[in-house]
């Protein structure tokens, strides 16, 4: 997700075997997801209470977009929602395993088209308001009505939802889908407090949901304060108060850590800062394995990019190895497709078709499109200066150099802060833009459908639509045999490299820097669970 949005909207998990197969190069045959019996016992979070209240301050260069799961579709905002709301199911912290959350059990019927969830008794929102199946139904229908950026995670799959009694939620799907539990674990499925506006985005609403923490205060772009939810079914977390402070750049974030203003620095420090902090011996530098990707969005509605040879030329001229070593100091690796390397079905289609640093091929393609040194292609390249860290300016500058090395392209670089950037992205105002994606759910579908399927990719604002791509992705979503699914995703990646609405760049890792006495748990989804943090 770009999580962005974005960025991301968030965009197929076979849950019983995912932990074993997710990062293997040869996918084994797939088996259906087993469903817990109606009497299954929920997994209760292990919590520690202490006589003294423990507070923790986290520093980030990120920003919150909408405190509303009907429209929030970026990585950090989803992290806040994961800690202040709860869904019917969730990923077991630190794993890819789905476990019960607000629901205690679930069953399927009609060949996987109907899913029935039983809620825990006595659930409450942060202020003590009872939470029933009707609240789940209301919240799901609200997402569908508002139809914001992440709504496709619901509307593409759910035909209707019913609440026959206070503890029963029934989803009727448009068609069976092999990864529905993984979708239910995402914020668009979270029940929200009745205070949320029923039919419009409520961006600054702090009523939240039924998660481990309540939002006590929120000052946009400055800080958000969370306190332990006294009505949370799982008990009180050890860290009873979490203060998240928003910093303008990586330099001020590092200074805040060194001055003792924060206990934990998270998204995003510069690679040299990470090296220096690790060398100091005063902090723990924790590496989070990366299914995080970076890519370039090409707006097909712009006249300059309508010719596919132009888009192919831009892809050919990119030099990923230089980006990885010079801009990111080796903390990332080149990526030649949208599906992360190491995830089953990943296929380096761009490397096969264009190679890397292939300036000669780029020149040939530009000539075919009618450009020359005397008639240059004019490109506007956009980046956002802090959301992905201070390296973004350098990344944009290097791409400019690589494209202009053809002698047939002139690049003007422009920037906008994250909130404006997201608006411009949604409206299709940017010609070429840099984005990143953190997974909504751990499956190749999440790295293809949100970007490439008509309608599901509207948040990108780039106008890409190909019926052949839609057909491939729809077939992959229904297919239960993983070997067959892998072949379908390979076809999708090859078609992506041919159409080039997006250019994959790099696959990254994330790093957390903490004081020595702090222990953290980060999911493979790369979400930091505040309630799982331990302070010794």
Image (cartoon, rainbow, N blue to C red):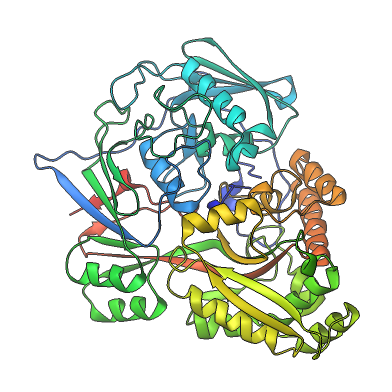
From this view, report whether residue 426 is shown above or below residue 379.
Answer: above
Name the residue furthest left.
51
Rendered residue at 36%/47% (across/down): 529
Q: Position of residue 337 (x, y in %)?
A: 70, 66
Q: Position of residue 306 (x, y in %)?
A: 82, 65
Q: Position of residue 208 (x, y in %)?
A: 37, 32
Q: Position of residue 425 (x, y in %)?
A: 61, 56
Of residues 144 and 536, the one drawn nearer to the viewer in this rendering: 144
Name the residue furthest top.
165
Quadrant in which residue 287 is drawn: bottom left
Q: Is residue 131 left or right of residue 215?
A: right
Rendered residue at 47%/25% (across/down): 103
Q: Is residue 514 left or right of residue 139?
A: left
Task: Say if residue 438 shows up in the picture.
Answer: no
Quarter of the picture holding the C terminus:
bottom left
Task: Say if residue 183 shows up in the picture.
Answer: yes
From this view, report whether residue 494 is shown above or below residue 64.
Answer: below
Rendered residue at 55%/52% (across/down): 423
Q: How many marks?
A: 0
Q: Is residue 132 left or right of residue 479?
A: left
Name the residue furthest front.
374
């Amino acid at each position: 997700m770009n999580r962005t949005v974005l960025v991301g909207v968030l965009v197929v998990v076979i849950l019983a075997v995912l932990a074993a197969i997710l990062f293997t190069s040869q996918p084994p045959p797939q088996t259906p997801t087993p469903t817990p019996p109606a009497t299954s016992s929920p997994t209760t979070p292990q919590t520690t209470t202490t006589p003294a209240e423990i507070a923790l301050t986290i520093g980030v260069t990120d920003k919150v977009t909408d405190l509303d799961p009907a429209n929030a579709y970026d990585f950090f905002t989803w992290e806040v929602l994961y800690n202040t709301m709860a869904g019917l199911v969730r990923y077991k912290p630190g794993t890819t395993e789905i476990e019960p959350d607000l629901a205690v059990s679930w069953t399927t019927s009609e060949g996987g088209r109907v899913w029935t969830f039983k809620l825990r008794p006595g659930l409450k929102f942060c202020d003590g308001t009872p939470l029933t199946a009707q609240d789940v139904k209301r919240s799901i229908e609200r997402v569908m009505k508002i139809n914001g950026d992440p709504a496709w995670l619901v509307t593409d799959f759910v035909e209707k939802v019913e609440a026959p009694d206070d503890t029963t939620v029934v989803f009727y799907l448009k068609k069976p889908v092999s990864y529905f539990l993984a979708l239910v674990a995402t914020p668009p499925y979270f029940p929200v407090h009745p205070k949320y506006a029923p039919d419009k985005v409520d961006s600054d609403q702090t009523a939240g949901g039924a998660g481990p923490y309540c939002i006590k205060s929120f000052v946009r772009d400055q800080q958000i304060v969370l306190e332990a939810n006294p009505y949370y079914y799982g008990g009180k977390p050890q860290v009873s108060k979490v203060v998240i402070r928003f910093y303008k750049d990586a330099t001020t974030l590092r200074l805040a850590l060194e001055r003792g203003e924060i206990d934990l620095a998270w998204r995003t420090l510069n690679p040299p800062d990470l090296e220096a902090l690790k060398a100091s011996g005063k902090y723990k530098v924790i590496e989070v394995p990366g299914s995080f990707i970076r890519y370039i969005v090409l707006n097909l509605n712009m006249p300059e990019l309508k010719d596919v040879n132009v888009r192919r030329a831009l892809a050919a001229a990119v030099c990923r190895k230089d980006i990885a070593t010079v801009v990111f100091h080796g903390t990332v690796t080149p990526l030649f497709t949208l599906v992360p390397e190491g995830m089953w079905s990943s296929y380096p289609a761009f490397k096969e078709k264009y190679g890397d640093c292939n300036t000669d091929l780029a020149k040939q393609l530009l000539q075919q499109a009618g450009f020359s040194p005397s008639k240059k292609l004019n490109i506007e390249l956009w980046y956002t200066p802090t959301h992905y860290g201070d390296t973004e300016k350098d990344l944009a500058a290097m791409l400019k150099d690589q494209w202009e090395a053809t002698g047939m392209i002139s690049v003007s670089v422009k920037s906008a802060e994250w909130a404006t950037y997201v608006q411009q992205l949604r409206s299709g105002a940017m010609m070429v833009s840099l984005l990143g994606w953190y997974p909504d759910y751990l499956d190749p579908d999440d790295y293809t459908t949100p970007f490439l399927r008509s309608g599901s990719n509207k948040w990108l604002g780039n106008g890409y639509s190909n019926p052949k791509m839609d057909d491939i992705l729809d077939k992959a979503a229904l297919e239960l045999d993983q070997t067959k699914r892998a072949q379908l995703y390979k076809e999708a990646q090859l078609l992506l490299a041919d159409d080039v609405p997006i250019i994959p760049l790099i696959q990254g890792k994330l790093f957390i820097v903490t004081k020595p006495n702090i222990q953290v748990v980060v999911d493979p989804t790369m979400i930091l669970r505040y309630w799982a943090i331990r302070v010794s």
